Amino acid sequence: MTDDIRTVPLELLRLGPPHNQLLSPLTRYLGVCGNHRAEEVSVPWEHRDFAVAIEALRYTGVGEQDRLTSLVRLGSEVTGVIARVEGLKNVLSAAAAQAGTLIQLELVISASELAMLPFELTRTFPGGPGSDEQFLVIQPAVDVEVTRRVRGIEAGAFSWPTLPKILFIAAQPEGMEVPRDAHLQALMGAIQPYLGAHEDTPEALFEAASPYLRILPAASIDEIQRTCAAEHFSYVHVLAHGLQDPSAPGAPFGLALHAGPGLDQLEVVSGERLAAALRASGQAPAVVTVAACDSGNVTEVVHNGASLAHALHCAGLPFVTASQFPLSFEGSIELVEQLYQRLPQGEDPRRVTHDLRRRLYASYAAQTHDWASLVVYAALPVDIGDQLRRVRYQSARRRLDALMERLDHRLESRADPGEGEGEDLRVRVGETLDLLPCEGEWKIEAEGLRGSVRKRLAQIDFMAGLAANADDPDTNARRERAWSRSVDGLRRARDHYREAARQSLLQHTDDLLQQSAIQWLLIQDLCLSAVLGEAFDRHRWSAALVSTLADLEAGTSEVQTWALSSLVELHVLLLAWPGAAAMVGVADPASEAHQAAARLAEHGTKLPLVVTLTRRQLDRYGDWLWSPALLERQAARGIVRELSREGSEGSGEQLDIVSLTRALGAVLGQP
């Protein structure tokens, strides 16, 4: 969640431009934290000495003991820089007093030479949170995550992506191998919950993944530019080697990409050029992850620019993760899995990167310092909490749609949706339903969605029972289980619809609350109540009618079309109980339903989806909800429905509900 995250900004300032300055104890910086007074700080190294010290963390010719010693020493020295800011100690301690809070220590910097410092190695210090002699980001007392932001890069009014549309950029020119297949497999695993039914072939899998993942397996900067100009991506994952560019002033680190389409020669591309290519559509991706050696490393600062990640963030990319030291193979896979599984689900990126850092420490700290290598540049919108709640809801909806499509596919292929893989899919449906919000602005929509999913599961179970072979004892047992689940599912669906309708009728103080159409919820409640043999509730029917007529009178064209769909089903339902039409004063419900269907067919030319969904709902009456097979199974379980037949006065024609829905389907046009 986001409400339990406290941001503590620490700004480090110096006079002059961001470049053209080497590290030196003689350089004075101002450290500012919150409303506390500014403090003068400095670094303990000369530039050359720091460059030598940091080299020990690049795994080049350094023993294990020396590596660990260097981590502690550099961490203590970096801590000495920021711990001089007394205001930081006070603010961190106050934030740490709130149990369960994640503290985001946001380092706001612009000076390129400060981007060199491994702030992620900061250790606990007197007056701050945590016990002594531990690394701040992994000590167990308080959750602290270090992020960076370049001064001047503010959290703009961008929207956190609700759709995980990922661009995977990989490059291995001149035999420079990267674990491309492993990263691709991790990305495919991350988007798998959003994929619906597809054939079990690699071609079908990649086709199903195409709305979510685009792959550039041998990327050049020109290809990246063209791809990003053609479509906008919300996430970009880069896998390439980092190299110094000897042709650029200061020999900065960049990405080793292919020199052109189909070429094996390499071209070192700077962060500025990559950022320009990624923004070719006019929009920046929200998340960029860079798995490349030295993507967070700064070498020369006399010339413009700092690290690749620093440069991407300076170009306005709001959330960039990279590595300031070489990242291990295992660590890079962990990065992809954690970020791309959890961020599209609406988890807070600061919580995700903090958990990732701790996982890297717990799993690999004996061999690597991947946990310290992870660099996070973040400029998040002020309403990130509200946005992430929307993302969580939309993500759960997409995953539910995919799961239900796969269950439908199993049923169509004659596979039992309650056995084997089908049972696994049902478990995942339940787990995904648990992700829907019970509070906040989406709670009513989510409750209605629970009803819809439970209703669809009940229909799938009913159809599975019909498809079973009654002559086979084992199959017959599965059929009975499927029908029992179906009846139970109808009850649960009815309860969800009823609760959503109740919530819609309550007075709420939340201005952001997303309301579902009350008549739709009431109609579903009435329909399932009839199916379960319950008495007609004229008050609910009348409330649904009033809401429907209000939408017909004052709604937009789209709202009016949906209202006509509701009007059709409201009058159909009057045939579900004997005498129901008389109780609400409707003389000829069949005629009223026909008139509403004719108007819907006319209005629906511009909104054919409404007509299609209405026709599909009407088909359920005859194929399922009022079918002889369901009536028989319900009677065996003590659920007896008193069926109604209605007709026009003096016509002598009597219609049951199935005949009426079939006739209305013809009015709307058969598919």
Image: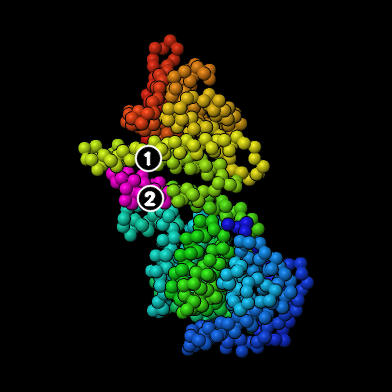
Q: Secondary structure at mark 2?
A: helix
- Asked if the residue under mark 1 is in contact with the one under mark 2, i.e. CB atoms within 8 Å, the reply is no
Give the x, y percent position of residue 296.
55, 76
Count of marks overlaid on the render: 2
Closest to the observer, 239 or 175? 239
Mark 2, residue position = 425
Closest to the observer, 658 or 94? 94
Q: Please, which colouring scheme is shown?
A: rainbow
Main secondary-structure element of the magenta-colored stretch: helix
Q: Label 2 amino acid?
A: Leu
Q: Is residue 88 left or right of residue 428?
A: right
Few, some or many residues within 10 Å of mark 2 (<14, 14–19, 20+): some
Few, some or many residues within 10 Å of mark 1 (<14, 14–19, 20+): many
Q: Secondary structure at mark 1?
A: helix
Give the x, y percent position of residue 332.
46, 71
Q: Which residues are magenta?
A: 404-429
Q: Residue at x 22, y 40 (%)?
A: 472
Image vertical order of residue 325 relative to residue 357, above or below: below
Quadrant where the C terminus sits is top left
Mark 1, residue position = 485
Determine the image quadrant of residue 72: bottom right
